[in-house]
Amino acid sequence: MVAKDLVPRFYKNERKDFLASIPKELLLDALKRMLLIRNFETRAEAAYQQGKVGGFFHSYIGQEAIQTAAYQVIGKDNWWITSYRCHALALLLGATPDELMAELFGRVTGNAKGRGGSMHFYTDRLLGGFGIVGGQIPIATGAAFSLKYLDQKSKVAVCFMGEGAVAQGSFHESLNLASLWNLPCIYVIENNQWGMGTAVNRALTNKRIAEEKAPGYNMKGYTFDGMDYLDCFAAFQHVYREVLETGRPVLIEALTERFKGHSISDPALYRTKDELKACMSRDPILQMKTDLIEAKILTEEQYKAIDKECRETVLKAITFAEDSPWPSPDTLGEDVFAPETEEGIR
Amino acid sequence: MTSTQLIELREALRQAMDEEMERDSRVFIMGEEVAEYNGAYKVTKGMLAKWGPKRVIDTPIAELGFGGLAIGAAMTGLRPIVEFMSFNFSFVGADQIISNAAKMYYMSGNRYSVPIVFRGPNGAAAQVSSQHSHCVESIYGVLPGLIIVAPSNAYDAKGLLKSSIRSNNPVLFLESELSYGDKMEIPTEEYLVPIGKANVVQEGNDVTLISHSRMVNLCKQAALELLAQGISVEVIDLRSIRPLDIETVARSIRKTHRAVLVEEGHFFAGITAEVGFEIMEVCFDDLDAPIVRVCQRDTPMPYSKVLEVETMPTVPRIIAAIKQTKI
């Protein structure tokens, strides 16, 4: 857990003033999106415990503020890429809870036709959930390369990774290329403190990963509080503007902590109960709720109603998934190759 | 009569890329020394001058980085050609080829295809020792989702590379450093060679000799020497490893009833192991003798000329293998 006095603050004005600078509708939208993610992860995990979902399952609970703020600031119509902890980003980018739950259930109506599972969610702008740590970083860099090649100056690529990926070679090679070739990519390290069961200080020598690594690539690097929606919002506003202006990549670190184990099979015994309690005391959703109630944008009743609505949406998704057909075994061999559209080549 | 040109294999490859870049602005080439140096083996000679640095791109030495970057570019609307200075360097970036390029279309429920060509020299050159000489086709051949092409001559190289660039799937296009200077008369006009069709390069009746890439030339030499001894050899050039055209192979064996398989790479779990097994599955009853194979012996590639020739398939080894089928 990041000690509270060490948590950086990105926005410079008073908290309530900064909050007041964000449109009310956007704040309520953020709360709703975070609650949808929280409810989705909670119910999907319960379905897993009942044996309805298999394989790996990496929960985003505790980290909701980061991708929610990124999505709101940057907007859907860009390229988005993340690790295997991909449920939230798919929801944010418009994949329906139905199709995502059906994917977890391995059904033909699933987001990837039941072929990808928990780690491989997609949308028309989400290039995936990637199962190999750091494997998505060169892909994101390539998406930024395409934007530049095709002269799409108003767009960026956004690449999420855990702090565990920073130790991979793909991180180094990608950031070097992105900086060398002026590619518009926002690399976001979601430092949730643990690479599976290995604490970040046993994997990296850096204290402030982005701030210390970025200068080595002649890039800007920033740190912000990933448990605080407002700080996430401020940070993404800043770096998004900067990348659009400069056409250059940027490296940022969101300090956060997942509330669950690395995956569903991880009881997280490496973290004490007190440590977990401390990080859960900074729950980004509860913080948001408190902020909005204080600002008189939200009432307790309204909060409960939004939470209930999200819960019902997710429960419906579970029903949809359960009622969906399994993929036909006849389709096993389909789509190993994309159809060819040119004549005479195969 | 169609007009022809006598050109080296490297020039055939360049023409293929050049024509496809002319045809499609999304096609570009990226790799180490492809631009200002004009290619380590001069395959991309003159391309920077013609197309400029936007489409002929020198990379730092970072196969994982630029290999993955190109896959990401392919997923987002471009059609990259990536040159590996040696396919042995692809191992540094193998995760991107294996986990991302090969699996993406299937894994994403057909949302994202990866139209990309990785090309460059594969296998042995002249005394470049263990780490620059490995044949990669059997390593990557086990992966569903990859197309693997390995031409033996300039005509096929040009036509197959054009087809590969037009394919909507990831293609590993395996060349041979020792063949870049091979000259051949090929059409001046544009043509394609379809991927997945083996070619009977020499007809014969007594035994079918099956190979791919540079080894096809050794097979043709062996066939010529055996002809003088009254043995008629049918030589098949697989041309593409994935998909494998086992039908053309089987058709020949139904005629000759004997098969010898030649591969520059190693025998263990090699391409000959696969082809041999498929022959057994498809036309076991047509065989009059056990299949024999000639591959690199089970050693890393040694540096010394004397040892190098000992580990590699040679014309005498191929001839001995054919005689082992007791024609």
Image (cartoon, rainbow, N blue to C red):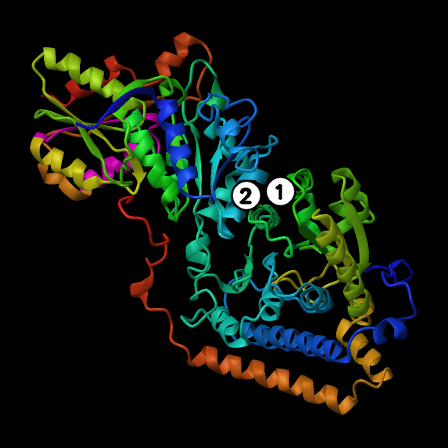
The chain to which mark 2 is attached is B
Crowding around mark 1 (Cα neighbors within 10 Å: few <14, some 14 to 19, many 20+) is many
Question: Which residue, given by chain and number where applicable, does mark 2 sit on?
Answer: B68
2 or 1: mark nearer the eye: 2
Name the amino acid, label 2: Gly
Crowding around mark 2 (Cα neighbors within 10 Å: few <14, some 14 to 19, many 20+) is many
**Which residues are the magenta region?**
B256-280
Which residue is more in the foreground, B136 or A278? B136
Residue furthest to the bottom in view is: A301
Quadrant containing the C terminus of chain A in the rendered view: top left
Is there CB contact under 8 Å for labels 2 and 1? yes
Question: Which residue, given by chain and number where applicable, does mark 1 sit on?
Answer: A170
The location of residue A267, given as percent across then percent down, is 66, 64
Q: Secondary structure at mark 2?
A: helix
Name the amino acid, label 1: Ser
- Please report the residue visible at 37 percent of the width from the left and 53 percent of the height from the top: A338
Q: Secondary structure at mark 1?
A: helix
Write down the quadrant of residue A283 in the picture: bottom right
- Please report the residue visible at 39 percent of the width from the left and 49 percent of the height from the top: B168
